[in-house]
Image (cartoon, rainbow, N blue to C red):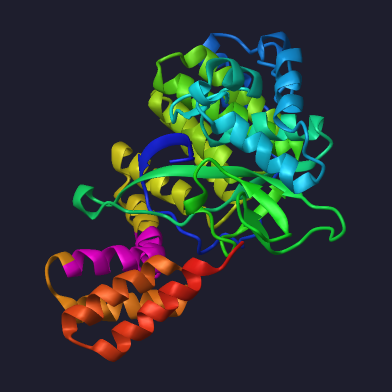
Amino acid sequence: MSLWRFFAVFLYFSLCGCSAVVQKVPLMGDQGPVSRALSGELILGRPYSASELPDHELFALTPEMEAFAEAAAAGETTADKKAEALHQALMTSTQLGGRGITYSAYTTNTGIDAFEKRQANCLSYTLLYVAMARHLGLKAEVNEVILPPTWDMREGDTYLFMRHVNAKVFMSGGGLRSWVRAVNTADVADIVVDLEMRRFRAHYKQKVIGKDLIAAQFYSNRGMELAAEGDSRNAFLYLRKALLMSEEPSYIWSNFGSFYRRQGFLLEAEAIYLHGLKVNPRDYTIMHNLAGLYKETGNAERQQYYQERVRKHRNANPYYMYRRAQDAVDQQDYTKALGLIKAAIKKEKDEVRFYRLAVTIYDALGDKQNAEHMRDKVYQLSTIRF
């Protein structure tokens, strides 16, 4: 998958609530638990110094990378052909003359490291591609995409919290456009370049993000990887740098809180989570993490409060309905499955996976007319060229 990981947690996460207002919230006083956590004294034994913080040039290019980009686009005269040629050159195997970039989920590299190691996750590849595309004179930006959630019902609603980015190349003459296309299609609108294009849909919520937020995501992502490796010192420094780049994304506060929880500093973890909820009062990931923390500390009342908020949110989510409908099909309970998938489609009308499952359900029920109608919807959604 072309995804970049933050950390593995048990949670419920959905598209619903993504419109919640994210607001700037002042930090607690100098002696508060959030400020103490931000200082690093609990991890380093002293407050951190600015010189210790990581500092990466995320869009830097080496002379070799510049030459590669120029060679990839040689002979191409239009922006769209240059954009497509660069992507193909990066992804084509070395045996066929390309760079041979392969997907690696577990390490967030800079663009230079991704090029040299020939490995990238979606963030790393986007950094690499955007830097090279800009060198070729293309208007390329980092595009954040909110992917729909997935639940594994067999493992107690296990969910791996991930975020996704890809590159968007704007074609001249139209300004910002609402329609985009994948590479290798024949349209003339803006181009989206993605390691796994089949996961992209134009109706998914998405936005171009600026350099500070890109950096915040990079450092937060890398910090959680270092935490998973047991390197708490550098994990803290990367996470602290992330918050210096941007304090606005609540998911970075969620990561920071989970890091302190993993280190056993539960008071600080709680305060960080609660601050994250002030930033975004509808961050259900933080709510789930708080429920787990309160279970750990024996605060049953607060645990139940957050669990109930998360449960109501999850049950109203169309992708959770879809998952339950899949399980009902596996159990051959097609009447239950039909009710669930119809409810999911009512909430999310542009998700082709819902209609595919509806075809299966109607076929099983012997309803040929509705099955054919669902097949028509699958065809319509599958053949739209973005």
Relative to 341, does residue 163 appear above or below in the rendering?
above
Residue 248 occupies which quadrant of the picture? top right
Question: Of residues 300 and 106, which is closer to you in this image?
Answer: 106
Question: Which residue is nearer to you in this view: 49 or 112?
Answer: 112
Q: Main secondary structure of the magenta part?
A: helix
Quarter of the figure with residue 276:
top right
Q: Does residue 91 appear in this view?
A: yes
Q: Above or below — where is 111 with respect to 196?
A: above
| Residue 224 in the image, given as x and y percentages of width and height | 48, 27
Give the residue at x 69% y 18%. 56
Depth order, front residue of 200/319 = 200
Q: Which residues are magenta?
A: 308-329
> x%, y% of residue 124?
59, 29
Visible in this render: residue 349?
A: no
* Viewer-side residue, 67 vs 253: 67
Vertical arrangement, residue 21 with respect to residue 70, above or below = below
Residue located 33% across and 67% down the image: 322
Q: Is residue 13 magenta?
A: no
Report the side of 200 relative to 279 (left or right). Answer: left
Q: Is residue 258 above or below residue 337?
A: above
Q: In the image, what residue occupies the spot 61% across and 27% down? A: 219
Residue 109: x and y in percent read 57, 22
The residue most toward the bottom is 369
Q: Position of residue 226 (x, y in %)?
A: 47, 19
**In which quadrant is the C terminus drawn?**
bottom right
- Is residue 336 left or right of 133 when viewed as pictured? left
Drawn side of residue 218 relative to residue 178, left or right? left
Does residue 327 show up magenta in the picture? yes
Q: Residue at x 63, y 20 (%)?
A: 39
